[in-house]
């Protein structure tokens, strides 16, 4: 999984993140998907600057300087379609490459809602990543994936800031 681009924009009461990743699955993951396993992919954001603001808000009113967003990739053998789900919304694709391409893009993801950073348009920095969230797999798979490199899929942390996008 490789990052292609990231950016951040101020909205009225929040910050909107955009990111693009290039994804590919190992043969083990492709086989698991073809056999009916749903693969959960999670986008994660962490605020890294201003640290003092994040620390103060956490202590004062349980502010969370992180955010996450989970998509689920499935294959439906009857329709021969791949689906990317977010909550009750889903989108179907004819090929795995198309589904992975769509899964690798997040647009207008609202983070840091109702914070001084978003309202005052203060400079900030953070990091974002995309990963296969094995903790959301059924328990038997969680145990069998331990120590298996084929099941580890993540982009690593990519910087994003108000001064301009990351990579």
Image (cartoon, helix red, strand yellow):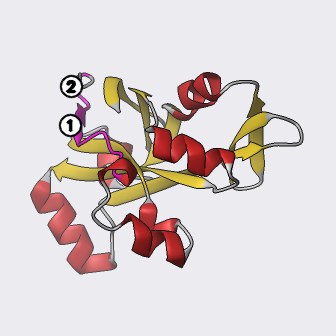
Mark carried by residue 123: 1
Mark 1 and mark 2 lie on one chain; the one further toward the N terminus is: 1
Q: Which residue is mark 2?
A: 163
User: Foreground: 131 or 139?
Assistant: 139
User: If the image is split into quadrants, where does the N terminus sit?
Assistant: top left
Q: Can the viewer see residue 74?
A: yes
Residue 106 in percent (x, y) is at: 51, 34
Residue drawn 48% across and 46% down? 28
Q: Secondary structure at mark 2?
A: loop
Mark carried by residue 79: none
Taking the magenta stretch, the answer to whether it contains residue 157 is: yes
Residue drawn 36% across and 55% down? 115
| Mark 1 Cα-neighbour bin, 10 Å: few <14, some 14–19, many ≥20 | few
Is 61 situated above or below 51?
Answer: below
Q: Secondary structure at mark 1?
A: loop
Which residues are the magenta region? 152-164
User: Foreground: 97 or 88?
Assistant: 97
Residue 18 in percent (x, y) is at: 43, 30
């Amino acid at each position: 999984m490789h990052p292609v681009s990231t950016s951040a924009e101020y909205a009225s009461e929040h910050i909107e993140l955009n990111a693009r990743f290039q994804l590919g699955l190992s043969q083990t993951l492709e086989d698991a998907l073809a056999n009916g396993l749903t693969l959960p992919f999670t986008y994660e954001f962490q605020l890294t600057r201003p640290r003092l603001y994040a620390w103060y808000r956490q202590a004062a009113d349980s502010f969370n300087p992180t955010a996450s967003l989970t998509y689920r990739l499935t294959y439906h053998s009857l329709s021969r379609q791949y689906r990317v789900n977010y909550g009750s919304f889903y989108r179907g694709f004819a090929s795995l490459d198309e589904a992975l391409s769509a899964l690798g893009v997040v647009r207008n993801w609202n983070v840091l809602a109702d914070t001084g950073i978003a309202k005052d348009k203060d400079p900030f920095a953070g990091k974002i990543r995309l990963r296969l969230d094995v903790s959301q797999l059924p328990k038997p798979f969680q145990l069998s994936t331990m120590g298996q490199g084929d099941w580890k899929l993540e982009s690593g942390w990519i910087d994003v800031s108000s001064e301009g996008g990351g990579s």
